[in-house]
Image (cartoon, grey):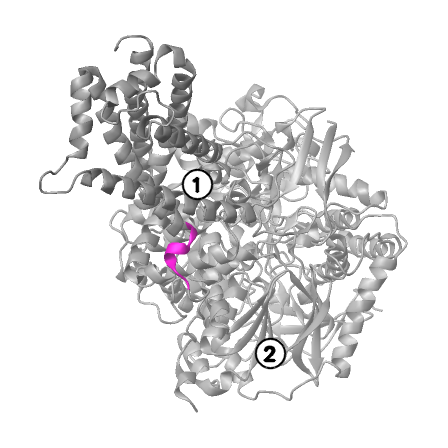
């Protein structure tokens, strides 16, 4: 085994992006892809796992096209997928404000925002489709915010210079998801989609090199069953819960993606995670999740910490001269409005130096005293009243009187299963959409672009590209006695039997919490060679202990939430290790990731385009993972170093 | 290849159990209840207004009662108006109670298990469930007594059907004070029933917005108070000797 | 703080359940209600007992998964708050708390505090959508919508489908849930073509799923964590009446 924990394989041969001018590539791909005769579509079965924006939109659209779709989600209703929690909005290059926006500008901003680690072809397609998404959602009845003239309202979001973000109060994700959910339910009623809620995918079935089905567990009865099909689409979301504490829902997990990875699908850029700067800090060891407070708060709040270490006076008693408004000090041009990654890391730096406030010293103040003085309490209440109430409810502190405490938290994962331009993984017949794939955000995701990508993939990209693959189908009918199916089922059965039979004494959550701490400490906002090596060792030891000491109560044939968690945490261990290996090998700072060894003289992130302008696609290996590099080329947006000084 | 395959989507399969009649739905039954209730409220208002003739004395009151019987004469047969009212009322009561029974049975199936921890009811009409069910029973029993007493005179000492005034005086005689108490109790039940029932009927039939719903609730309260007061004044006046 | 809990335990749908007492100590007032249950479960597992099953997911009040009746009130005592956003500082040392599942014929208990709410999905399938297949949409600005209509539609669409309205209703009625969806869609111009078939279909499915009728008591609106008001039920009634008359 090499000292770097991995070995390098052949580069990724072809990401299948068409050649030619970038604005014509998607058009060209739609024409060159083969179609399936409408009469033949009903003979083709497609499995879609997940019912979030990417999954529900794909399942509904494929159903509308006439394919027979089987759709799965682990939640009790398709409407509860975690896309529902997205607050801010969705970008679209409509240029309704006549402020100079265009498809090309959205494309440019997204490539730049991704710190030049995404594919130009994919991002351009995303920008092109963005306008169609808004049309589609409005037609479905999504109640976007409107102006008095009855037309759609837009706002500027995440530091963008144009107003291109469409929103529905602070619940844009909810409204978009309900639109997709309703379209999906319409297809369920029409009989084109079989929807299975409270079912979890536990294994992928591969026959003769093609993805042909999945093994699922009915979470109510515990029954293990097989669903066979001509193609499988994973829309299973991100893996932020590897950190235990994140803004993700408690159920979010990597299992579906990881099972596919173990069966040969490449996992790309696993270390790319997004850390959101304005979350409510952890209050104690009981904490189960972190709550995001809208980024808009930084428009009026001032971020500071006490100059003296460990100063635990009431914030009102700390005079101005003893406060460090560190963002305004370090980034005079942008001040409190620096991008997410910069704000997050700066908070970590001051807390690591001992200036943090609140429990454990993990928090910085976000102070509205000046805004209240300037605008009046009423105006502040009108703007942020809901958020202030939510903060009060969670922390028991009144933000009108005492500054909020905030701290960064894991929010989104840019990495995911590797896909080509067609959203196909390297396993034929396995497609991946939404946050589960790695494709469009590079090393950092811009605000209001996750919703755009999920719906773009599900409504418009996948339904157009999957037909090229399905045109070869229907594939040979399989029986459940096929050796590949039997083997996959056995893996699932064995894993369940192991957990229930293990004579352990520690709960699943206790391991998950510990894993999360390791990941956050060493593979969070700031990484170093030494720390990552240490983390890999710690994770391996903890994993061994997990398999020795984990205790799962109950039976297999019932609703058993501990058993569900155990399987998910087992996969998080393996993912966590790969994330550390990926982070270790990428010795540059980029996106939200600060690599201690790669910084400028002023201590800012330094990207290394010469050595790292590629996608790291990892192949699963029993001993060590294999790295396949996909070179990134920039023909239209030339890499520059970001600066916010 | 058949042409139906060309269509973009299959038509949603019929969700409703066939044959499904909208009027047998929960909302349909509620509308039936609301409409029958409104008819009864109109009758009650007329009845209440008529009762006030008592203050004009025996002759006026009995003339009013006779007038009801001969209403429309000679064009219409004797007691035409009364029969229309009687039939309408019986039908309304039948519909009101029939819908109640159907809805109650459905509600029982819809909430088969009670909470171990009973919390005080909340909402805009927090005690409506109890008021409408139990108040309704009290009102129903009262109506039977009321018919036996003042319509058929079975339990009333004044048997002369034409002496409405005398019957009223007799029934609320201070010596028969429990009758007056029962009458007032039934009126209280009626008032509570109407306070919820009137706005509830408007909500079911017309579906007002929030502003009008609040107004409806206020109007319902006013109407209920007016009706109770209008009815209560007669027995109180008789019992306390204001009218004799 | 120290608390005495009584929690509904029921191994599966077919077995009779009961309230079981538990004592729990050292609960932080900063913990959320569900985190308090997490702590209880950690203790139960350590003792080799079956932990309490309850539905939860986002824990930020938007997914609608959490569903506990706390001391007889769906989502507990705090107005406009889901169980996951309820914090233990609402309680004091020594309090006793009763925790039960949603109670409704249409929401059978699956295990402990977990109920089956698929009836809500069926109501949506029966018409709670606008038929707009992908790709057919006209330009978004082709139909302006008055701001007050869009805002009213949003208020109704804010429903998270948690089912607290049904749990609170003495009749086990799903009218507030259904009214919210009917109102949302019928306030939008896009929702007009299917307005009548939608309301008839949804009401039929609502009744067939075993939800009761509405007594206009208003417990549902008082329990709704998203503060959806009785006006949506009024709108549902009105739409239904018009559609039924036209259908007759």
The secondary structure type at the circle numbered 2 is strand
Image-quadrant location for residue C131:
bottom left
In the visual, does A621 lie left or right of A348? right
Given residues B220 and C82, the one toward you in this image is: B220
Host chain of mark 1: C
Q: Is residue A398 above or below residue C109?
A: above
Residue C221 lies, in percent from the top left, at: 46, 39
Between residue A444 and residue C181, name the one nearer to us: C181
Q: Tell me where the magenta segment starts and ends, as one range.
A: B20-26
Q: Image height check: is A458 above or below B45?
A: below
- For label 2, the crowd category at 10 Å Cα-Cα, with few meaning under 14, some 14 to 19 and many 20 or more, is many
Chain of the residue on which disc 2 is drawn: A
Distance in Å between CA atoms under marks 1 and 2: 50 Å
For the residue pair A57 and A377, the one nearer the viewer reads as A57
| Residue C52 visible in this rendered orientation of the protein | yes
Q: Which mark is residue A625?
A: none
- In the shown orientation, is residue A585 left or right of residue A45? right
Q: Position of residue A323 (x, y in %)?
A: 57, 27
Picture layout, residue B21 above or below residue C235? below
Rendering coords of residue A471 (x, y %): 53, 87
Q: Can residue A100 be seen from the camera position used here? A: no
Q: Is residue C88 above or below residue B181?
A: below
Question: Which of the 4 image quarters holds residue C204?
Answer: bottom left
Pointer 1: what residue?
A: C215
Question: Is residue B25 one of those drawn in magenta?
Answer: yes
- Residue A239 percent across, percent down from the top left: 65, 58
State which quarter of the image contains the N terminus of chain A: bottom right
Label 2 sits on residue: A231
Identify the residue at horizontal 88%, vertical 57% (top origin): A502
How many residues crowd mark 1 within 10 Å: few (<14), some (14–19), many (20+)?
Answer: many
Query: Which residue occupies the extreme left position in the image?
Result: B74
């Amino acid at each position: 085994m090499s000292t770097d924990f991995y070995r390098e394989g052949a580069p990724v041969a072809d990401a299948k992006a068409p050649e030619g001018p970038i604005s014509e590539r998607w058009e060209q791909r739609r024409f060159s892809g083969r179609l399936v005769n409408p009469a033949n579509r009903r003979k083709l079965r497609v499995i879609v796992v997940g019912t979030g924006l990417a999954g529900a939109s794909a399942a509904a659209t494929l159903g509308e096209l006439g394919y027979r779709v089987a759709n799965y989600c682990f939640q009790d209703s398709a409407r509860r997928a975690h896309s529902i929690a997205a607050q801010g909005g969705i970008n679209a290059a409509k240029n309704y404000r006549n402020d100079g926006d265009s498809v090309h500008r959205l494309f440019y901003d997204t490539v730049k925002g991704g710190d030049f680690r995404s594919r130009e072809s994919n991002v351009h397609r995303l920008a092109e489709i963005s306008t169609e998404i808004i049309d589609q959602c409005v037609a479905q009845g999504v109640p976007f915010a409107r102006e008095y003239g009855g037309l759609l309202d837009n706002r500027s979001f995440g530091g963008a210079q144009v107003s291109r973000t469409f929103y529905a109060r602070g619940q844009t994700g909810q409204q978009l998801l309900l639109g997709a959910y309703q379209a999906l339910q319409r297809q369920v009623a029409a009989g084109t989609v079989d929807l299975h809620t409270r079912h979890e995918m536990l294994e992928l079935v591969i026959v003769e090199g093609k993805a042909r089905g999945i093994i699922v567990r009915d979470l109510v009865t515990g029954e293990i069953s097989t669903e066979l099909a001509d193609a499988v689409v994973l829309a299973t979301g991100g893996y932020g819960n590897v950190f235990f504490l994140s803004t993700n829902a408690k159920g979010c997990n990597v299992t579906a993606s990881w099972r596919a990875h173990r069966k040969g699908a490449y996992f790309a850029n696993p270390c790319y995670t997004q850390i959101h700067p304005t979350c409510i800090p952890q209050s104690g060891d009981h904490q189960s999740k972190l709550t995001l407070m809208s980024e808009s708060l930084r428009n009026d709040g001032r971020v500071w910490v006490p100059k003296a270490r460990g100063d635990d006076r009431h914030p009102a008693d700390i005079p101005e001269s003893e406060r460090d408004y560190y963002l305004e000090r370090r980034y005079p041009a942008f001040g409190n409005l620096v991008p997410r990654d910069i704000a997050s890391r700066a908070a970590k730096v001051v807390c690591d130096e001992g200036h943090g406030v609140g429990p454990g010293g993990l928090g910085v103040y976000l102070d509205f005293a000046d805004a209240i003085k300037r605008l009046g309490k009423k105006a502040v209440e009108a703007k942020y009243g809901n958020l202030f109430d939510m903060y009060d409810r969670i922390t028991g502190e009144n933000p009108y009187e005492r500054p909020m405490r905030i701290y960064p938290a894991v929010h989104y994962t840019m990495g995911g299963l590797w896909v080509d331009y067609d959203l196909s993984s390297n396993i034929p017949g396995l497609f991946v959409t939404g946050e589960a794939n790695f494709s469009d955000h590079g090393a950092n995701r811009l605000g209001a672009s996750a919703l755009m990508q999920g719906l773009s993939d599900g409504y418009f990209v996948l339904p157009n590209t999957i037909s090229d693959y399905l045109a070869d189908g229907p594939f040979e009918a399989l029986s459940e006695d096929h050796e590949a199916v039997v083997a996959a089922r056995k893996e699932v059965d064995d894993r369940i039997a192991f957990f229930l039979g293990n004579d352990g004494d520690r709960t699943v959550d206790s391991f998950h919490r510990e894993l999360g701490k390791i990941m956050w400490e060493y593979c969070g906002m700031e990484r170093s060679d030494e720390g990552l090596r240490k983390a890999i060792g710690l994770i391996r030891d903890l994993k061994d202990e997990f398999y020795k000491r984990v205790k799962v109560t109950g039976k297999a044939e019932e609703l058993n939430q501990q058993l569900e968690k155990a399987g998910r945490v087992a996969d998080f261990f393996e993912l966590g290790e790969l994330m550390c290996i990926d982070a270790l090998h990428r010795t540059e700072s980029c996106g939200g990731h600060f690599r201690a060894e790669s910084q400028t003289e002023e201590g800012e992130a330094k990207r290394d385009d010469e050595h790292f302008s590629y996608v790291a696609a990892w192949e699963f290996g029993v001993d060590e993972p294999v790295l396949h590099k996909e070179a990134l080329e920039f023909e239209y947006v030339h890499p520059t170093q970001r600066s916010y000084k | 290849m058949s042409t139906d395959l060309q269509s973009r989507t299959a038509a949603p399969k019929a969700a409703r159990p066939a044959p499904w009649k909208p009027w047998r739905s929960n909302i349909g039954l509620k509308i039936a209840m609301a409409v029958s209730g409104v008819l009864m409220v109109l009758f009650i208002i007329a009845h209440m207004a008529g009762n006030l003739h008592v203050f004009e004395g025996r002759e006026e009151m009995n003339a009013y009662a006779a007038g009801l019987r001969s209403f429309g004469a000679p064009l219409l047969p004797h007691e035409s108006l009364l029969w229309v009212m009687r039939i309408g009322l019986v039908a309304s009561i039948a519909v009101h109670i029939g819908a109640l029974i159907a809805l109650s049975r459905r509600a029982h199936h819809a909430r088969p298990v009670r909470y171990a921890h009973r919390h005080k009811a909340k909402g805009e009409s927090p005690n409506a469930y109890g008021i409408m069910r139990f108040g309704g029973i009290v009102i129903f029993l009262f109506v039977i007594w009321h018919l036996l007493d003042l319509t058929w005179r079975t339990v009333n000492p004044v048997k002369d059907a034409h002496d409405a005034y005398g019957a009223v005086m007799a029934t609320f005689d201070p010596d028969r004070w429990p009758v007056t108490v029962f009458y007032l109790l039934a009126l209280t039940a009626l008032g509570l029933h109407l306070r919820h029932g009137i706005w509830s009927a408007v909500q079911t039939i017309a579906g007002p917005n929030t502003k009008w719903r609040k107004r409806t609730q206020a109007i319902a309260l006013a109407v209920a108070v007016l009706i109770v007061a209008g009815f209560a004044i007669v027995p109180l006046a008789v019992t306390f000797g204001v009218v004799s | 703080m120290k608390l005495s809990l009584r929690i509904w335990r029921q191994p599966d749908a077919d077995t009779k359940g009961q309230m079981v007492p538990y004592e729990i100590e050292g609960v932080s007032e900063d913990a959320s209600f569900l985190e308090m249950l997490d702590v209880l479960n950690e203790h139960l597992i350590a003792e080799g007992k079956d932990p309490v099953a309850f539905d939860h997911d986002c824990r930020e009040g938007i997914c609608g998964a959490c569903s506990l009746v706390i001391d007889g009130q769906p989502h507990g005592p705090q107005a406009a708050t889901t169980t996951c956003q309820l914090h233990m500082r609402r309680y004091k040392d020594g309090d006793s708390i009763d925790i039960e599942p949603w109670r409704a014929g249409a929401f059978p208990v699956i295990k402990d505090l977990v109920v089956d709410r698929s009836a809500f999905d069926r109501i949506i399938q029966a018409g709670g959508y606008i038929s707009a297949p992908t790709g057919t949409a006209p330009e978004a600005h082709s139909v302006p919508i008055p701001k007050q209509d869009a805002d009213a539609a949003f208020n109704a669409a804010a429903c998270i489908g948690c089912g607290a309205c049904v749990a609170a209703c003495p009749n086990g009625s799903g009218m507030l849930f259904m009214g919210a969806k009917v109102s949302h869609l019928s306030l939008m111009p896009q929702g007009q073509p299917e307005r009548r078939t939608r309301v008839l279909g949804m009401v039929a499915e609502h009744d067939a799923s075993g939800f009761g009728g509405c007594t206009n008591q208003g417990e549902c609106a008082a329990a709704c964590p998203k503060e959806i008001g009785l006006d949506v039920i009024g709108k549902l009634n009105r739409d239904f009446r018009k559609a039924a008359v036209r259908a007759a």
